[in-house]
Image: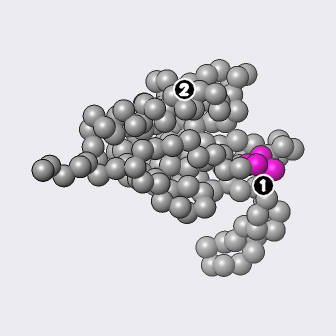
Amino acid sequence: MTASPTPPLGTRLDGEALEGPWRTAYVENAATARRAMYRRDGSLVSDQVSNYDPPATGVHLCGVTDDDQQPTTVATYCAPADKARDLWRAARAVAECSKDEADFVVDLFVDDQVEDDFWSNRQLWPRAIASWNALSQASPS
């Protein structure tokens, strides 16, 4: 009996580990969600900021608050840098759209920096998830 490949991993904004097939996991009401923001030392920055929380390394879906004032996290998919780049490229190949049609921007974060980005929307994003699942079956981590 052969061992099954390691499933792709990621982390949603709420910290829940994603195991098995990737899935579309949007943060509910992302555009209106507000939360307290703290500095790394634990001091309060503000109690009314958006839920902007990109991964240090991974794919980040970034929208904007309803008042168009602050970025907000729609979803995050954490992965090591090389895997994150592969996932981002695969998503771009099937889920890129024009800015006029976009609901969010898809950022590639590596070491807390945006390496690249493209526009996408909720209608196209399931194609990216399907592409990721096909990629993970073809080349397990």
Q: Residue furthest bottom?
A: 42
Instruction: Categorize mark 1 by other alpha carbons within 10 Å: few (<14), some (14-19), many (20+).
Output: some
- Which residue does the numbered mark 2 point to in the structure image? 95
Please name the residue shown 56% across and 41% down the image.
24
Instruction: Describe residue 96's horizontal placement relative to residue 69 as left or right.
Output: left
Please name the residue shown 57% across and 32% down the image.
125
- Which residue does the numbered mark 1 point to in the structure image? 33
The reply to whether residue 137 is visible in this rendering is: yes
Q: Amino acid at mark 2?
A: Ala
Residue 26 location (% of width, % of height): 63, 46
What is the magenta range?
Answer: 29-33
Q: Secondary structure at mark 1?
A: loop
Q: Secondary structure at mark 2?
A: helix
Residue 69 location (% of width, % of height): 82, 46
Please name the residue shown 56% across and 55% down the image.
12
Instruction: Categorize mark 2 by other alpha carbons within 10 Å: few (<14), some (14-19), many (20+).
Output: many
